[in-house]
Image (cartoon, rainbow, N blue to C red):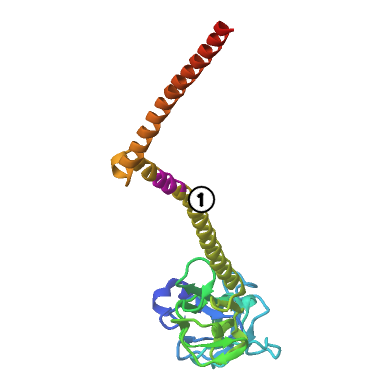
Amino acid sequence: MLQIILLLLPGVLSNQWSVNYPPLSPICAARGSDVSIDCRFTYPHEQQVQQVLWCSMRSNNGYCVNEPYVYDSEANNNQKDFQYFGDKTSNCSLLISNIDQTHSGEYKFKFITRENKWTGDPGVNILVDDLRVSMSRSRENGSTMVGDSLNLTCTLSCSGNLADVQWFKNGDPIQHSEPVLTFSRVTAEDSGNYSCSLRNFKTTVSEEITINIEDVAGSPTVLIIVVFLVSLVFITAAVMLIRRRKARTQEKPVEEREEAKGSLYSTTQPQTTADNLPGAEDVQQEDEVEYSSVNIKPKDLLQVSANTEQENDSTIYSAVMNG
């Protein structure tokens, strides 16, 4: 008869029969953490609760009717990961320890009285994921150099900002509890493997992310490049200097020849002007005198010879005549 009344008057009696779960659903949990589901239930005062149960919708459909239950107050073989810390009056809270991905899904609470059974529907959903470390940095491409800035953020994909975390470097804890680890100017000493976990839950530790900070001054590759560039500059400068000296050496004989030619021209040119040379008149006079003597001397000799011959002829002629 009571079940018929519940069906006929659900609006009236449902105020007395209820199960209340956390308002924020689904619950996002980090793998390895403990999750507490806060739960309250109500029923008519004249009723007495005899059994309470928690079930997973992986093994049930709609209502909590099929075993195995994750918790059963009447059973002695409850799963170790599920602990009921409620009661049979109003508190139906459940603790899931060391949660992992197999615990993801919907859970519902059910209580049984002498006259009735009630399942809280809809149930509460739990999502389980791993913590992850993401990195953002000032240099978009290439390696991270000394002096760059970067942030490491501990995140849970199914949740917003985490409240309190623990950071690790190379497995050792760092005194920093904020979900964002900030490096305003990184140094070579900041290189290492970083991970995070929920505080007091080292079992939730994330996978490590490796940061390699390159020191430009101490990088062998960069040092080789610098040496190569400096050597290239010196070699280029030396080649240019040798070419300039060679060009100057080739230009010098040409200049000397031009200067010699100019000197020769300037030396020969004044000789054509007799007036500019000392003793030019004397030389000219000597030439004239010599010329005149040359012109005159043959004439005198010719006359002398002619006279001599004439005299000889006269002598011979006279001798013949006398003979």
Instruction: Please give left or right for residue 195 compared with residue 38 in the image.
Output: right
Q: Which residues are magenta?
A: 257-264
Which residue is rendered at x = 55% and y = 85% of the image? 189
Instruction: Please give left or right for residue 68 compared with residue 288 in the image.
Output: right
Dominant SS in magenta:
helix
Badge count = 1
Whether residue 43 can be seen here: no
Amino acid bearing label 1:
Gln
x, y (%) of residue 275?
28, 41
Using the image as rendered, state which of residue 37 and residue 74 is in the foreground: 37
Which residue is rendered at x = 56% and y = 12% of the image? 316
Using the image as rendered, state which of residue 163 and residue 317 is in the foreground: 317
Using the image as rendered, state which of residue 204 and residue 173 is in the foreground: 173
Instruction: Indicate whether 134 appears above or below 43.
Output: above
x, y (%) of residue 22?
46, 82
| Residue 258 included in the magenta stretch of the image | yes
| Residue 95 included in the magenta stretch of the image | no
The quadrant in which residue 319 appears is: top right
Whether residue 179 can be seen here: yes
x, y (%) of residue 156?
52, 77
Residue that numbered label 1 is attached to: 250
Instruction: Indicate whether 190 appears above or below 89.
Output: above
